[in-house]
Each structure stands twice: as C-alpha cells, then as structure tokens.
Amino acid sequence: MSNKLSNRISLPIYFSLIIFFIFLITVVITGLLFFLAQVFGLLNEELAQDGFVLPIMVLIACTIIGTTISAITSRKMVKSIRIFIEATERLASGDFSMRLQLKSPPEFEILSENFNRMAEELGGIEILRTDFVNNFSHEFKTPIVSIKGFAEVLKNDDLTKEERDEYLDIVIEESTRLASLASNVLELTQVETQKILTNKMRFNVGEQIRQSVLLLAAKFEKKHLKLNVNIQDYELSGNKELLNQVWLNLLDNAIKFTPEHGEIEVNMKKNEDNLVILVHDCGIGIHPEALPKIFDKFYQQDTSHSTAGNGLGLAIVKKIIHLHHGTISCESIPLQGTTFTVTIPIGM
C-alpha cells in the first residue's frame, strides 16, 4: 500500500519541485541582475523611485528568464515523451524487439517496465500466430496434395483391382484426416471464443468415462491392449458434451502411443472438493523438452507427422478444462509412459 501511495504522489512532487526550482532560480537571477545593474549604475534613482516602471522591468525580466529556464528544463521531460512515442510507433509497426529504459520520474520507470512486458507478450503472440499459420498450412495442404495425387493415379486404366483399392483407401484416409482437421479447428475456435461455460448440468462423470471406453473398444481390441479401469460414480456439474471430448481425446491419445499388447490405466479419486482423473499409458513417453509444448496448437512431438493426428486435441482439452475452472497436467518418462492428470471442482 505504501509503495502504491508513494508512486501516486511521486510525480506531483516531482513536478512541484521542478516548478519551485524554476521559480527560485528565476527570482535569484532576476535579483542578481538588478543588483549588478544598480552597482554599475545602470539604474538611476528616478527609475528606482518610480512605482510603475521598475515593477514592469522586473516582470519582463522574470518572464524572459523563467521562460528560458522552463524551456531548458522541460527538454528532458519532452525527450522522454518523444522516446515513448517513437517506441509505440515502432511497436505498432511490428517491431516487438523495442524496449524502453526510462528511469525518472518513478512513473516513467513503471511505464517502461509495463511497455517492455507488453512488447514481450506481443512478440510471443506473434511467434505463436506465425507457428499456427505455418502448421495449419502444412496440416491442411498435405492431405489435399495426397488426395490430388492419388486421384490422378486412379485415372490410369492399367491399375489392378488391388492397387485401385489401395489408392482408394489412402484417399479415404486422407479425406478423413482433412475432415478431422476441419472439425478440430472449428471446435478449438468455439471453445477459445467461449468465456462462460454454458449448458451446465449435473451428470455421472464415472458413467460418462465408461461410455467413452466403450466407444473406443474397437481401437483397444485392434492393438490388443489391456485396460485397467478404477472408476467410481461421482456427479459433476459441467458441460457434458465438452467433457466427453476430454475423455475421448485423452483415451485416444493413450491408445495411439501405446504399443501393441500394452496397458492403459484410468483412475479416479475424490480429493476434498475436487475430482481427479488420471489416464496413464505405457507408451513411448514425451521428451522433457517437448513436455511444456504439448498443449500448444498444432504441436506434435513426431515432427515427421507419421503419427495420426494434427496437434489440436490437447489444446482443445486444456481449454475445456479451464472453462470448468480445472487444471490438467502431464508427467512423462521417455520409453516408460505418460500420465495425464485432470482436476475439476465438483461443486463449481
């Protein structure tokens, strides 16, 4: 509180001191000039005794001297303002490397710190935007080019039935991938623009997770995965449809990165006023350098893009969890597995 108060009064005191010193210097210089003028006989007794001429001379002298001193002392303040204007112009033109180093008065130092923080945040947003556009272009272009190429090959009458079926399967797969990308981008846009959670209702989240497991049963069987589920029946208040996407996405990721005949665990526990859901797989794990980026849009640890997916699922999951005032975290050890932990308030 004292720091805020001192910051509030520092600028008025700063300007008050400047005005006081300008006034003091003006009076001293004016007095000194008239004293010297009298010593050297430049002022005669008639002027000194005149009650009208002398005050006017003093007023004119004070005005000239005061204006000159004010112009000189204000140059520093004006210079600081000009530096700030130039910095904002460079920032507006896209130069996010611009930084301010104003030190006085204290308000200008605070202004510099806030400006530098803003420039840093905008620079980070610009990098994310550029990465988003580049990744989106890559993810969107790749299946289109693939579909176009195989469609041209299918025009060849010399293809055998096996080759034609193989190429058609690839076209169908790439079309599905493209549709999934468009759907995920739409879902991400919807949840990102959503600030308030709508369509809230109380429902059995344990039953919902069990249904999600059943929906993915074919994928579990295809890879011969073992599933250990420790789920209780707890009621939760939230958007049922959005949370269903969370469980499907986390389970689908676990299946995707778990090798055949591997094991996946889903556990649930109640912790005070929160519900904690853990999804663990024994897959390839995530590299420590990649761990902080897994919730970024379009981020994929597999830079070759050989693994199915477009890097939007976890970004959607994180936003949905935040809409429910919850948290999601990830712990992973390369070649040993990954655990996602979702914590959601029960009575939100």
Image (cartoon, grey):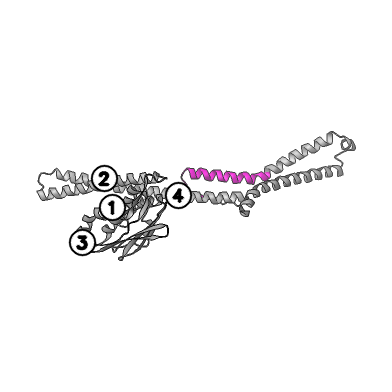
Marked residue nearer the N-terminal end (4 or 1): 4
Q: Earlier in the sequence, mark 4 or mark 2?
A: 4
At label 3, the amino acid type is His
Q: What residue is disc 4 on?
A: 123
Label 4 CA crowd tier, 10 Å (few <14, some 14–19, many 20+): some
Q: CA distance from mark 3 to mark 1?
A: 21 Å
Find out whether the residues at labels 3 and 1 contact each other: C-beta distance under 8 Å: no
Q: Of the two numbered discs 3 and 1 on the same chain, state the one appearing first in sequence.
A: 3
Q: CA distance from mark 4 to mark 3?
A: 47 Å
Label 3 sits on residue: 224
Q: Is residue 196 magenta?
A: no
As shown in the figure, which amino acid type bears the numbered disc 2?
A: Ala
Q: Which residue is mark 2?
A: 179
Instruction: State the extent of the magenta-drawn residues as a range.
Output: 72-98
Left/right of residue 110 with respect to residue 210 in the rendered view: right
Q: Position of residue 249 (x, y in %)?
A: 30, 53
Real-space CA distance between mark 4 and mark 1, rounded to the nearest whole angstrom: 28 Å
Q: What secondary structure is found at the residue carrying circle 2?
A: helix
Judged by depth in the image, the label closer to the viewer, 3 or 1, is 3
Tell me the tag on residue 309.
Answer: 1
Is the Cβ of the residue at disc 1 closer than 8 Å to that at disc 2? Answer: no
The amino acid beneath tag 4 is Gly
Q: Residues within 10 Å of mark 3 (few under 14, many from 20)?
A: some
**Measured from the top left, where is residue 137 in percent x and y?**
32, 46
Q: Is label 3 in a helix, a strand or a loop?
A: loop
